[in-house]
Image (tube, rainbow, N blue to C red):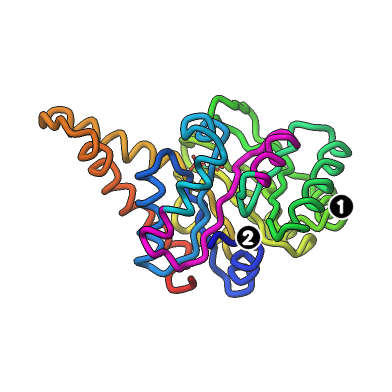
Amino acid sequence: MLVSMKDMLQHALRDGYAVGQFNINNLEWVGAVLSTGQQLRSPIILGVSGGTVKHMLGLKCIHDIVVNAMDYLQIDIPVALHLDHGTTREACEAAIEAGFSSIMFDGSHLPFAENLAITRHLVDLAHSRGISVEAELGTIAGSEDGIVNSEVIYADPQECFTLVSETQVDCLAAALGSTHGLYKGKAKLGFAEMKAISELVKVPLVLHGGTGIADDDIRKAIACGTAKINVNTENMYAWCEAVKALFAADINDPRKVIQQGLLPVREMVARRIQLFGSQNRG
Ligand code: 13P
């Protein structure tokens, strides 16, 4: 059964670890992430971007694939199916209707009052059905699914406090220097600001742009109140690198190509689970 992120993230914040959000790209990717989580008994958040919604033939299709894959693979760890960066109220409502157990409303591009009003509406709707909501403030740089932001803008602590206290959102992506995609040089995160915002809002913080952040910085972020870490690019690159090598080997079965590309992805997901400390928490 799919579950909301609320309990898994509150446990993580309380016990000082983080749960990974691993974005999915296809049916086999769903199986690879779920079975790696199961082997390590880690809670799992499956992230679904707008691009993946189109690629995997819609929200309902994704929901049914995940639920049936969990049944087939006998998955009994906590799993949240989460809409990543829903940028409109309608996109989030559609994910709720399709049976997702968690949504992110990313209103960071909107004036604060509008972000707050839509987040509040979606929290009321989602909570009435036991679904969790993530909100965003500030600007995460980099590019994801064609959405490009060239500059980092730190989340404002007072806005974070107001948004969380007035909406009762379950977790907050407060942008503090992280980037979607590859970092130019070393990632520079605002740990002092992260700790201050965490103490102010008291809900789990979410770190987007997990790819390319040094292990020590991941541990520091967890110590500063981060309880959810999103990872995507490193897995996509690992899959593509493995598949490029396969083409030289004259393999003509698409199932083998897709599955072999997922071998390094499974390893990377396992490494992340161990680093985040979510092993044996599911
Ligand atoms: P990366 O692609 O940089 O790992 O970030 C993933 C992410 O934050 C998804 O929302």
Instruction: Give how far across and how far down residue 252 sits, in percent.
Output: 15, 30
Q: Nearer the viewer, mark 2 or mark 1?
A: 2
Instruction: Give how far across and how far down residue 186 sits, in percent.
Output: 48, 42
Q: Residue furthest left?
A: 250
Where is mark 2, residue-wise? Answer: 4
Which residue is at 66% across, 63% downward? 6
Q: Is residue 95 magenta?
A: yes
Residue 212 vertical position relative to residue 197 in the rendered view, above or below: above
In-front residue for pair 250/99: 99
Apparent side of residue 73 relative to residue 46 in the rendered image (left or right): left
Instruction: Give how far across and how far down residue 150 sits, in percent.
Output: 61, 26
Q: Which residues are magenta?
A: 69-97
Residue 76 vertical position relative to residue 206 in the rendered view, above or below: below
Element assignment for label 2: loop
Which residue is at 50% across, 50% downward? 46
Where is mark 1, residue-wise? Answer: 162
Q: Callout 1: 10 Å neighbours few (<14), some, many (20+)?
A: some
Residue 191 vertical position relative to residue 107 in the rendered view, above or below: below
Q: Amino acid at mark 1?
A: Thr
Apparent side of residue 78 relative to residue 124 in the rendered image (left or right): left
In-front residue for pair 152/71: 71
Who comes first in sequence, dot 2 or dot 1? 2
Residue 35 vertical position relative to residue 24 in the rendered view, above or below: below
| Residue 199 figure quarter | bottom right
In-front residue for pair 119/152: 119
Q: Callout 2: 10 Å neighbours few (<14), some, many (20+)?
A: many
Which residue is at 40% across, 39% downward? 26
| Residue 111 figure quarter | top right
